[in-house]
Image: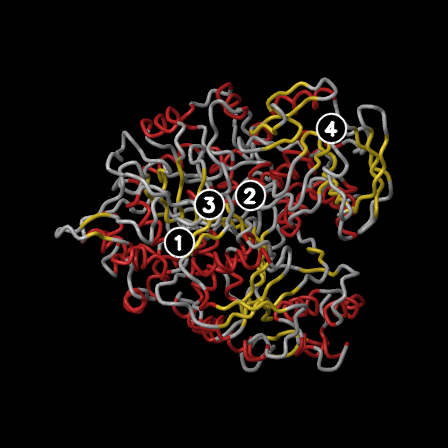
Amino acid sequence: MNNTLYRKPLGNSGLDYFDAEQAVNAIEANAYAKLPYTAKVLAENLVRRCQPNQLNDALAQLVYRKRDLDFPWYPARVVCHDILGQTALVDLAGLRDAIADKGGDPAQVNPVVPTQLIVDHSLAVEHGGYDAQAFAKNRAIEDRRNEDRFHFIEWTKTAFKNVDVIPAGNGIMHQINLEKMSPVIQARDGVAFPDTCVGTDSHTPHVDALGVIAIGVGGLEAESVMLGRASMMRLPDIVGVKLSGERQPGITATDIVLAITEFLREQKVVSAYLEFFGDGARSLTIGDRATISNMTPEYGASAGMFYIDEQTIDYLTLTGREPEQVALVEQYAKQTGLWADALNEAQYERVLDFDLSSVCRNMAGPSNPHRRLATAQLSDKGVAQARNSDNDSRDNMPDGAVIIAAITSCTNTSNPRNVIAAALVAKKANELGLSRKPWVKTSFAPGSKVARLYLEQAGLLTELEALGFGIVGYACTTCNGMSGALDADIQQQIVDRDLYSTAVLSGNRNFDGRIHPYAKQAFLASPPLVVAYAIAGSIRFDIEQDVLGHDSQGKPITLKDLWPSDEAIDAIINDAVKPEQFRQVYEPMFDLKVDYGNNTSPLYNWREQSTYIRRPPYWEGALAGERSLKGMRPLAVLGDNITTDHLSPSNAILASSAAGEYLAKMGLPEEDFNSYATHRGDHLTAQRATFANPKLFNEMVKENGQVKQGSLARVEPEGQVTRMWEAIETYMDRGQPLIIVAGADYGQGSSRDWAAKGVRLAGVQAILAEGFERIHRTNLVGMGVLPLQFEAGVNRNTLGLDGSECFDVIGERAPGASLQVQITRKTGEVLSINAHCRLDTAEEVAIYEAGGVLQRFAQDFLEANAG
C-alpha cells in the first residue's frame, strides 16, 4: 500500500518520512505551502496510507478544496474513557459471539489500531472535598458499584490485542493524553509521522493544542477505526481564527474560552476544523491552548488546532518527554512544513479575527456553555439581585443557593495557571477568615495526579483543603453529572421550598439536568471564581461588587481583595511545576506488561444478573430485520438544540425513573443505582434512559395549550399520554416503526453512542430534523438509523405537525440524495415533501444498508474468512 516513491530519510534521525510536499506539488506547483496545517497532516496520511491508484484523486480534494469525493483517513490511535470505551469493547465481545455463532474464529476479532482505555468517568463525588478521607472513600464506592464493569475491563486487557488500560484513580483521559500519551510525532516501523487520534469523548480535541488532529467520535465510529477500517471523510471546512492582542491582567484562560465559545457559535463553525494562529495564539501556553481546544464541541467545531512551535517544545520538555522525542517533534515539524513559521502562506475558506485584549472576566450560563455572562454585568442581566442575606443559614438557604461548587473537568484542571489561581484565592480567603457556606458541596477533581504534586510543592494544597476543596478523585466527576448525593437535609429543603438551587463548576457542560437532578441550573466559571462562589453561597450574589465578608478590622472583603496577580501565579508555576513530577506520575502508570492471551477465553462469560454488562442484541430479533421506513409514527416532536443529554442522560438514576424501577426489581439497593452512564454496557438498563431527561419538552404532550416538561410521550392512535418508557414498550410490543421529528442542531453535546442506540432499540428508523451535530449524525448511521434533513424553510411548524401523523420515506438512499417523505395526517390527507438524505458518504450508505457498523463488520469478516 505504501507509496514508496515519497519515502525519504528524515535527516540523521535514523527514521524515514513520507514527503507529502512533493506529492502535493506534483498535483499543482507550490500548492503545499498554501495548505492549512490540517490539510498538510491529512495529505501525509494519504501519501503514507492511501492506495497508489487512488492517491492523486484524493490529494486533489485537498489541493483544489473539493468536497465531492470521499477519501480515507487512518487515525494512529483510539483513546477511550471507560464509559464509551467499555461499551465499545462490550460491542466487540458481542461481535465475537456473533462470529462464533456463525462458525468464525472469535479470537481473530481484535482492535487493529492501538487502543488506550482510561477509567475516568465512573467516580461519583459522594464525599465532598471537606472530608479528609474523600478520595479513599469515593474510590472504595467506585470499586464496589462498578465491580461488574471493572471485571469486564480487566478481561479485555488480556482477551484483546492492542488494548492498554489505565485503571481508575489515575486521571482524566484528555489530560493523560496531553501530558503523556501523545508523542505529537509517532515513530513506528522506522517511519516518523504526525500523531492523530479519535476518542470516545467529544472533548478529545483537547490535544489539538499540541498540533495533533484529535477528534471526538461516538463509540460506534471508534469501533470501526479500532477494527482497522478507514474513517472516510470529505475535506472539512477549515477556518482560520486569528488571535491578536494580549489578555488583560487577571483574566484566565477560562474567561478567554468562554468568550471565544460565544463568538464562534455566532460565527457558525459547526463541524469545521479551526486553526488558531497569530501573535495572540503564539503567546498562549499549551495549558491555555488546551483550555481553548477542549471546548471545541461547545462552539460546535470538530477540531480546534494550534500549530507546532516553541510553546509545544517547551511543554513537551516540561511534561517529561524524552529529549530524543522532543528533538524528533521539532525536526519533523520543521522538515515537513508543520512548524508555525512555515504556515504564513496558509489559505483558509475564511478567517475570523478575535482580540484577546477584549476579554473580560466571564462566566457562562445558565443551561448553555456558549451563553456568556460578563461578571461585571450580572446585575444588569438579572442573575445577581439585591437581597438581605442576614438570615441565610444551612436551614434557610437563599434563593439561587449554590449547592455545588466544583473545580473539575478536563477544560480547566489541565491548566496549572487556573489551578494555582484558585489555590491563591483560597489562601487569601483563609488569611482573611472567610469560609465556604455550609450548604455548598465543594470538590476538587484534578485531571492529573501531577496537580497534587505541584500544589504540595507550592504549599497550596492545604489552603484548598481548608476551604473545602480537597481532592475527591482524579476523574471527570461533576461535569459528567457524577456530582454524588446531597446531604439529605439539603435535598429535602430544596424539595419542600421548591428552591431555585444552582451549581457553579469549572467544567465545559452546564445543560439542564446534567450536573445534578436538584441543581435547577448550572453555571460555568474559572476555578478561582468557583472558590469565590463557594464563599458567596448564591448565584444571586454580585461576585464583583458584593461583600463576601469582613476582615478582623471589620473592613468589607470583595473579590478584588482575593484575586492574585498574574506575576504571583507565574512565579509559583516557574518554581513549583517540574518535569520530574510528570515522570514520577507517568512512568509507573505506563510501565505495564500485559500478556495477551494468558489462557483467557476469547469469549466473555456474561453474567446474566448483571445490570452493567450484558451481551448486546444488535444481531438479533427486530434489529436484524428490515427497516421498512413505512408507516412510522412519531415517538417525539422536538424543538431546537436537543442534546445527547436529552436523548440519553448520564447523571444519577432516581428511584422514580424507569431505570430506577428496573434496577430495584433486579435487587440493587438505591444507594448503588449509580449513574446512567455506568450502566451503558447493559442494554436493558441503558435503553430505559432513552429520553429520560426530566427537562425534555416533547411537543406532542401539551397541557392547557402549553408543552409539558418531562420524560413524556403520547401513544398514537389512542392519544394516551404516558411516561416515555411506557410508550416505547407499547410500540415495541406492537412492532411499530417510529420516527423522531426535530428542529435545528439535533444531537448537540457529548459523543454518546447510546443516544443513537437507545432510539434504535426503541424502534426508531429515521430522524427528520432541520440539522444534525456531526458526531451524533454518524452515530445514528452507525446504528442503522436514517438521518433526514428538512429542506431550507421547511420544518415541523410550517407543516403543522402534531405527532398524530404517519410517515413513509420513498427513494434510493445515496449521499446527498433527495428523498420523498409522505406524511399522512389523522384526517387522511397526504402531504409530500422532499428531505435530504444525510448519509454523507458512500461508506455511510454501505454501513446503513448493512444495519450498522457492527453488522457490516460481521458480514465482511465472515465473507473474508469463508471457506
Q: Can residue 139 be seen in the rendering of this structure?
A: no
What is the quadrant of residue 360 in the picture? bottom left
**Which marked residue is nearer to the observer: mark 1 or mark 4?**
1
Q: Is residue 460 depicted above or below 687 in this figure? A: below
Q: Kindly report the distance in space between the C-alpha atoms of the residues bearing marks 4 and 2.
A: 24 Å
Q: Is residue 190 left or right of residue 251?
A: right
Q: Residues within 10 Å of mark 2 (few under 14, many from 20)?
A: many
Q: Which residue is mark 1?
A: 375
Look at label 3 and name its amino acid.
Val
Q: Residues within 10 Å of mark 3 (few under 14, many from 20)?
A: many
Q: Is residue 247 left or right of residue 819?
A: left
In the rendered structure, which disc, 1 or 4, sits on the residue that comes first in sequence? 1
Q: Kindly report the distance in space between the C-alpha atoms of the residues bearing marks 3 and 4.
A: 33 Å
In the rendered structure, which disc, 2 or 1, sits on the residue that comes first in sequence? 2
Q: Quick one: 395 or 866, which is closer to the camera?
A: 395
Look at label 4 and name its amino acid.
Ala
Counting every numbered tag in the picture gives: 4
Q: Which residue is mark 3?
A: 119
Q: Which residue is mark 4?
A: 622
**Which marked residue is nearer to the observer: mark 3 or mark 1?**
1
Do residues under tags 3 and 2 come within 8 Å of each other at their CB atoms?
no
Percent position (x, y) of residue 282? 48, 73
Q: Which residue is mark 2?
A: 84
Q: Residues within 10 Å of mark 1 (few under 14, many from 20)?
A: many
Q: Kindly report the distance in space between the C-alpha atoms of the residues bearing marks 2 and 1.
A: 36 Å
Do residues under tags 3 and 4 come within 8 Å of each other at their CB atoms?
no
In the rendered structure, which disc, 3 or 4, sits on the residue that comes first in sequence? 3
Assign the C terminus to one quadrant of the image.
Answer: top right
Q: Quick one: 700 or 100, which is closer to the camera?
A: 700
Give the SS element for disc 2.
helix
Give the SS element for disc 3.
loop
